[in-house]
Image (tube, helix red, strand yellow):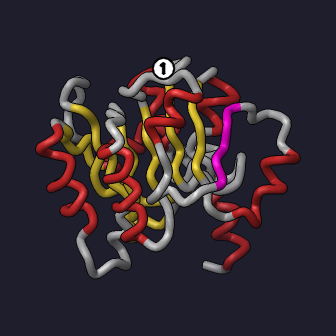
Amino acid sequence: MNSFLKSILGLIYKVSPYSQAGQDLFALEIFGKKGTYIDIGAGEPIKGNNSYLLEVKNEWKGFCVEYNTKIKHLWEKNTQRSNKIYWQDATKFDYKKAISENNLPINIDFLSCDIDPQEKTFEALKKVIDDGIKPKLIAFETDKYKESIDYEKLASDFLFPKEYKIAVSGVYSELKKKKIYETWFISKEVTFNKINYSKWVKKFNY
């Protein structure tokens, strides 16, 4: 399959027009409109972004944390995004202070955690939890398809004693079904039975 055809198929079969694997759609499925979020490693304001659909189309409140200032101009040009973005190191960020600054509850609905390299994603996750934040849903990047370290297990060992369970396993991006790169965890307070991503995504005819 040539690169042009792959790009066209990616547009046709993409689960969400914004996020990589439908993280935003899953958050909406669980919590509906007017939720709360923290988006770590937000990237660009629209393309590949896990919180654009939530904030702009569904009235969610929250904030983003992004270290790559090379894309700062894209956020400055964007007039749709009004929730705050912090240009800081997610592994050293004061999440509790930011929660207070943005008038958000400690038990936010959705945490998206996706930065490079992978060990930093795990460090950022631990920093959020250690700061006393209690997300109900966590989209955690594992990069299982390429990492020698099992970050899903590390995250599970860290989160399970804190009353989390796996909601969606084997998350892959677009047509790359062999490239499993995320696991979605959910608080045990939320009623949801574990499902494999390949089954969940069928509702989008993907």
Residue 84 is inside the magenta segment: yes
**For the residue marked with disc 1, what is the amino acid?**
Gly
The total of numbered circles placed on residues is 1
Residue that label 1 marks: 32
For the stretch drawn in magenta, what is the main secondary structure? Answer: loop
The residue lying toward the viewer, choosing from 108 and 106, is: 106
Q: Residue at x 67, y 26 (%)?
A: 57
Quadrant of the frame with the N terminus: bottom right
Horizontal and vertical percent position of residue 55: 64, 30
Q: Residue at x 71, y 47 (%)?
A: 45
Vertical side of 6 occupied by 97: above or below: above
Residue range corresponding to the magenta coloring: 83-87
Q: Residues within 10 Å of mark 1 (few under 14, many from 20)?
A: some
Q: Nearer the viewer, residue 33 or 196?
A: 33
Relative placement, left or right, of 117 versus 87 is: left
Q: Is residue 30 above or below residue 44?
A: above
Residue shown at the point (85%, 36%) measured from the top left: 79
Q: Residue at x 57, y 31 (%)?
A: 62
- 54 on left or right of 189: right
Q: Is residue 13 visible?
A: no
Secondary structure beneath dot 1 equals: loop
Give residue 54's position: percent from left, percent from top: 59, 31
Task: Determine if the magenta segment contains residue 133.
Answer: no
State the image coordinates of residue 121 (x, y, percent, origin top left). 41, 62
x and y, in percent, of residue 174 in the image: 52, 58
Most extreme residue toward the left is: 161
Quarter of the figure with residue 162: top left
Residue 16 left/right relative to 206: right
Reply above or below: 121 against 15: below
Q: Quadrant of residue 69?
A: bottom right
Task: Please state which of residues 29 and 199 is positioned toward the viewer in this rendering.
Answer: 29
